[in-house]
Image (spheres, rainbow, N blue to C red):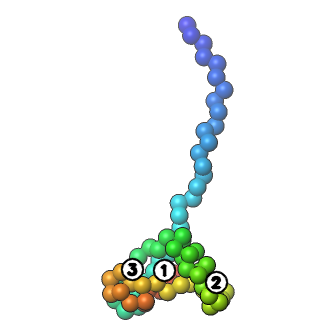
Amino acid sequence: MELRIGLKREQEVPFGPSPEEYNYRCSLCQFEIGVNEAIIDAEIGSAKFNGYYYDGFMPVLHCLACHQATMKYSKD
Ligand SMILES: [Zn+2]
């Protein structure tokens, strides 16, 4: 009979939260999409760099459907 003695080590699973998405909706054609926070972060960085950042700033993005800069963050 084999006796196994082993310390069960906790596996190192990086507890990475799944990337957050922000719900965006086009004010023109109502197209909706979840925008990865990395994209938002990049836009915010750009806004800060260009001096038009303000508290609570959320970038307006180009709509993939109608190609206008009309994609706005919508909370619901
Ligand atoms: Zn659109």
Q: Secondary structure at mark 1?
A: loop
What's the CA distance linking mark 3 and mark 1?
A: 11 Å
Q: Which residue is mark 3?
A: 32
Q: Which mark is residue 49?
A: 2
**Camera sees residue 30:** no
Q: As rendered, which of 26 and 45 lies closer to the eye?
A: 45
Q: Which one is closest to the eye, mark 3 or mark 1? A: 3
Mark earlier in primary sequence (2, 1): 2
Q: Secondary structure at mark 2?
A: helix
60 lies above or below 18: below
What's the CA distance linking mark 2 and mark 1?
A: 29 Å
Mark earlier in primary sequence (3, 2): 3
Q: Position of residue 42 (x, y in %)?
A: 56, 75
Q: Position of residue 53 (x, y in %)?
A: 63, 87
Q: Which mark is residue 59?
A: none
Q: Which residue is mark 1?
A: 76
32 sits left or right of 38 in the view? left
